[in-house]
Every structure is written in C-alpha cells, then in structure tokens.
Image (cartoon, rainbow, N blue to C red):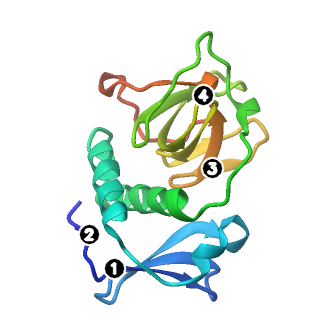
C-alpha cells in the first residue's frame, strides 16, 4: 500500500453519489460505503484531512499489514474505517447475529477481533473503529460476511457489536479472506 496522507487531502460530501468522499487532490477520489442516512451533519461539509485523521490512518494501516489484503482492499478498509470513526451516526448493536462468549473482551481502537456467527459457528474478522465498555463499532475486514438474516456485509461495512461477542484475533489465526456465511 503506497498511499501516504497529505495535507491536501479533503473530506467532502458528494450529493450525486450520496456519500462522503476523500479527495486526494491528484485527480483521484475515494467514495465511502456509507449513505447520507448513516452520516452525522458534519459529514455534509468540506473538511481538511487533519493530524488526528493521519494518526488513525497509520494505526489502521499498521493493523492491515497483519492480514492478507491487496492494496485496494487495504485502502478500502482503512478509509472506510476513518469515515466510520469520523462521520457515522451512533448505531445500535446488532449482536444477535453473533455468539456470546463466557467473558467480555475489551478491544482497543485499531485492533482486529473475531466474532462467531450464531447461524453456522464460522468466525468473522473485524477491525475495531470505536469502543466503549459495552460495545464496539467494527468494520468488516474480509470480503463478505453473511449474517443470519441472509443479509451480507462487505469489506468496509460497519456494524456495532456487544463486546461479549468479541475475542482477540491472533496473527497465527490467519484467515483466508473469503466469503463467510
């Protein structure tokens, strides 16, 4: 992954695409996965890519090195994670899709975690974007995650999950990034 934060980068809202974009100011942009109904009011105006954004960028980038992602997948995961952290409305947990654990786990921002689907006991890989003592906002860190309801989440989608459904991911638990569900 060869892109590096720049003080010329700009967060913007694109009405035509109904999404937040990151304008790299070199003729290319990144369009987020999150529609306007998921965004806080601040997302609808222009903002420079700030020092806090860059710090989180590098934290998420470092995390992505420990899983098998190509450059495009890593970019998608990192930038959607930044957008979720900065511009998503608070969400209610959707923990019923995942098996409760005996002990609650307290993840940290930027950490990879696993959770287990109740429907088929398969594990899913997630990147923690924001956390509190009860629940964590996570970004799907694999190409596809099929939930119990038949709905799919894709790389870069957000879901909030109670911490008692999460467990630490270890690099030796290498997951092949394939459809889970």
Q: Residue furthest right?
A: 149
Closest to the camera, between mark 3 and mark 2, is 2
- Of mark 1 and mark 4, the one earlier in the sequence is 1
* SS for callout 1: loop
| Left or right of residue 147, residue 143 in this image | left
Q: Residues within 10 Å of mark 3 (few under 14, many from 20)?
A: some
The reply to whether callout 1 and callout 3 are in contact (CB within 8 Å) is no
* x then y, percent, for residue 83: 50, 63
Label drawn at residue 153: 3
* SS for callout 2: loop
Q: Report the residue at 53% width, 69% height from top.
A: 32
The reply to whether callout 1 and callout 2 are in contact (CB within 8 Å) is yes
- Of mark 1 and mark 3, the one earlier in the sequence is 1
Instruction: Write down the residue under mark 4.
Output: 163
Name the quadrant containing residue 40: bottom right
* SS for callout 3: strand
Instruction: Write down the residue under mark 1.
Output: 9
Alpha-carbon distance for marks 1 and 3? 28 Å
- Of mark 2 and mark 4, the one earlier in the sequence is 2
Who is closer to the viewer here, 79 or 47?
47
Alpha-carbon distance for marks 3 and 2? 27 Å
Alpha-carbon distance for marks 1 and 4? 34 Å
Instruction: Write down the residue under mark 2.
Output: 5
């Amino acid at each position: 992954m060869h892109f590096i934060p720049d003080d010329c980068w700009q967060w913007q809202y694109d009405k035509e695409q109904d999404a937040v974009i990151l304008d790299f100011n070199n003729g290319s942009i990144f369009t987020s996965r999150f529609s306007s109904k998921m965004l806080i009011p601040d997302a609808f105006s222009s903002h420079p890519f700030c020092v806090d954004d860059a710090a989180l960028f590098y934290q998420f980038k470092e995390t992505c090195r420990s899983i098998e992602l190509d450059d495009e997948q890593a970019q998608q995961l990192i930038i959607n994670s930044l957008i979720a952290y900065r511009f998503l409305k608070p969400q209610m947990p959707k923990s019923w899709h995942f098996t409760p654990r005996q002990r609650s786990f307290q993840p940290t921002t930027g950490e990879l975690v696993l959770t287990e689907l109740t429907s088929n006991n398969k594990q899913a890989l997630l990147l923690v974007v924001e956390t509190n003592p009860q629940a964590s906002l996570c970004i799907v860190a694999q190409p596809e995650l099929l939930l119990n309801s038949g709905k799919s989440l894709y790389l870069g989608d957000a879901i909030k999950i109670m911490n008692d459904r999460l467990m630490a991911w270890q690099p030796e638990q290498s997951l092949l990034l394939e459809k889970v569900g």
